[in-house]
Amino acid sequence: MNGNEDKNHLLIILGITPVIALTDSVVNAAGFGILLIFTFIFSGIIYLPFRGRLKEPTDTFVLLILTATIASILNDFLACHFPQSASNLTLFLPLLAVNSFIVYTLKSYDPQEKKIKYILNHTKKFLICLLLLTITGALREIIGRGRLFEQALLISDPTTYLSLIVYSPPGAFLVMALVLFIYRVLRKK
């Protein structure tokens, strides 16, 4: 692996880390995954026509301000229309604005490509990310709390944890690693 590939993988891992923290339930995982996709799409539509017209570091600052603005608008939308989800996600929404996964993807745009095609192709990657996050959230909710969509599956007491390690933040990484491993194995078939 060359230095650029190592750097790219590190950026993706850093970008996905705050997102993994929200996978303690299906609703949180899916909700944040959807916000990630909307932030990418809206940022791409606004940013890509100007990509390369500004010099660094101004270009990066503009992109960060843009994603921060979109994340704030999505936060306000959530607070107004989905207050329960907003209360769970609000703490992490500012991290969406500086998510290196979004920033790296938009910064890697080649002006020779068609903008809409680029956004659609990369939206597929974000949809896969949404699927993997949702599966991780479901597994953590079922194994960790014995519940799914806050409905009792394995235990009826909502304050009891079946596996605290799976429900804890380190457990998020363990479960996500398992989900990614299975995904990669299935993808090779």
Image (cartoon, rainbow, N blue to C red):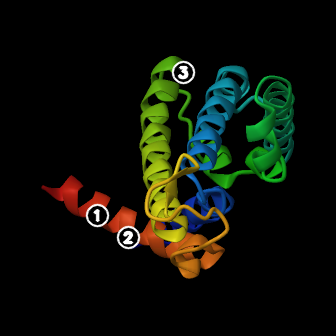
Say above or below: 31 vs 178. above
Give the numbered dot on residue 10. Answer: none
Mark 3: amino acid:
Lys
Q: Which residue is mark 1?
A: 182
Q: State the separation of the CA atoms marked 3 and 1.
A: 32 Å
| Residue to which mark 3 is pinned | 115
Left or right of residue 188, residue 85 in this image: right
- Please tell me whether mark 1 sits on a helix, a strand or a loop: helix
**Can the viewer see residue 13 in this picture?**
yes
Q: Quadrant of residue 42?
A: top right
Q: What's the residue type where badge 1 is placed?
A: Ile
Residue 48, position in %: x, y?
66, 26
Could you tell me which quadrant the N terminus lies in?
Answer: bottom left
Amino acid on which disc 2 is placed: Leu
Residue closest to the eye, 87 or 51: 87
Mark 1 in CB contact with mark 2 (< 8 angstroms):
yes
Residue 119 rendering spot, x and y as whole percentages? 52, 27
Residue at the image position 48 percent from the left and 76 percent from the top: 174
Task: Please name which of the two marks, 3 or 2, marks the residue nearer to the observer.
Answer: 2
Residue holding disc 2: 178
- Element assignment for label 3: helix
**Point 84% across, 39% down: residue:** 68
Apparent side of residue 185 relative to residue 137 in the rendered image (left or right)? left
Residue 51 vertical position relative to residue 33 in the rendered view, above or below: above
Query: How far is disc 1 from disc 2 in space, using C-alphas?
Result: 6 Å
